[in-house]
Every structure is written in structure tokens, then in C-alpha cells.
Amino acid sequence: MATKWGFETEYIQSCNCTYGCPCNFNGYPDKGHCEAFVGYKIRTGKFGDTKLDGVKFALAFWWPKAIHEGGGTARLYVDPAATDAQVHALEEIASGKHGGGVWEIFPKTFAKALPTKRAKIDWKYGEYVASFKVDGVGEVQSDYIENPVTGEKFVGEVVLPTGINFRRSVVSRIKRLVLHDADFQFDHKNTAGFTTVIKFTEKGPA
């Protein structure tokens, strides 16, 4: 039986696509496959009776083609400050058994979900300029996209009224995306990024 849950979270997204990422617009990954590393710091939230306030976690994803074509691999990383109950709650949410838009849809595209790993997560959040680092695993650094002629900072956002992951986000440049763990071997510069605050429930993002 599905559990009632919800949380408000700071969110940093990175992937190997070019700025904006065509996958957000029913397009295909411009490199032919998808590599993504996303981070969360929950401001307030609950899964059933388990409070999730302050929990930091990250998710790594790899798909051989477009996401909807399946064959993906995923792993959850949780900061060791989280309790066993909080880790279990995140694993349940990430399993896809309790709804939540992307949380329900993505697991259907996985061929393999690797065991959860606990690792210290350093977190810095702001619009455009943001970063997270998973100790011993990898890191993501977000910044402004820069005009190639003038060097001026690009300011813009996407609005997705029926988005499964977020409904509104600023568009950023991932100046560094590095992940070296098991099946995940990523090393990218100047790729697609998004930073935003999302409210999730079992019905999806608000």
C-alpha cells in the first residue's frame, strides 16, 4: 500500500546534454545516451511518520539511449547524518512504489538499481551558482551560462506546467560534472543544468 509523503527540497540537476537538455521537451539526448547526477537537500518533509527535514542525498543515473527506452542504472547516495529510518524512507520513495511523478516513472526505466551508498555530501545552494559533492564519488558545480561573444551572464528559466520532475527552474551551466563509482564513469564540462526548489508529494511536483 502506498504511503503518504511530501517534501520541499533544494535541487541541483546535471546531465551530459547541451544547455537546456532536449529531454525536458520530449526530445532525445543529444549525445545519444543519458548520464545524470542530481542532488537534493530537503528543507521540510515527511514519509509517513518519518521526518525528512535537512536530509541530503543524491542520485546517479545512466541510460544507454533515451530515458523512456529503458535499460538504465541508478544509485542513491545518502549523507551519513540521515538516520536508518530516513534512509529507508528515501529508498521507498525512490523505488517508485509510492507515486510522485518522476519518482514513480524513472524506476520503470531501470534495468539495474545499485545498493544505496552512504557518503558525506557537501551542499551549497543558490539560483544558478550551486554545487554538491559526494565524498569519494563525484561532484557537480553549477554556474551561469555565459554569452560566447560578450561573456554576459545568461538569465532564464523554463516553465513546464505538466512536468514530472519540476514545474519551474532556472537554466544553468554545469561547469563540472564528475562521477566515478561502479557503472558510473562521468566527466563533463559545460553541460545542461537546472537549480530550483521543488515541492513533491505522492502526486508529483507542485
Image (cartoon, helix red, strand yellow):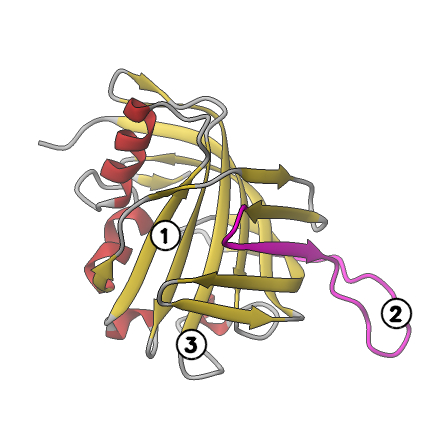
Which residue is disc 1 drawn over? 164
Quadrant location, the N terminus: top left
**In the depicted view, which residue is nearer to us: 42 or 134?**
134
- Residue visible at 50% across and 54% down in the picture: 137
Estimate the spatial distance between the alpha carbons at disc 1 and disc 2, rounded to whole Å: 33 Å
Estimate the spatial distance between the alpha carbons at disc 3 and disc 2, rounded to whole Å: 28 Å
State the image quarter where residue 20 is shown: bottom right
Which residue is disc 3 drawn over? 27
Range covered by the magenta-colored residues: 135-157
Q: Residue 104, image x and y in percent?
A: 24, 49
Q: Is residue 143 above or below residue 55?
A: below
Quadrant location, the C terminus: top left
Q: Nearer the viewer, mark 3 or mark 2?
A: 2
Type of the residue with mark 1: Ile
- Residue visible at 77% across and 62% down in the picture: 154
Per the picture, the main secondary structure of the magenta-coloured stretch is loop
Q: Residue furthest front?
A: 136
**In the depicted view, which residue is nearer to us: 165 or 158?**
165
Residue 147: mark:
none
Secondary element under disc 2, as helix, strand or loop, is loop
State the image quarter where residue 149 is shown: bottom right
Estimate the spatial distance between the alpha carbons at disc 3 and disc 1, rounded to whole Å: 15 Å
* 97 sits left or right of 191 in the view: left
Nearest to N terminus: mark 1 or mark 2: 2
Q: Does the magenta segment cover residue 149?
A: yes
Type of the residue with mark 3: Gly
Q: Are marks 3 and 1 in contact (CB under 8 Å)?
A: no
Which residue is disc 2 drawn over? 151
Type of the residue with mark 2: Gly
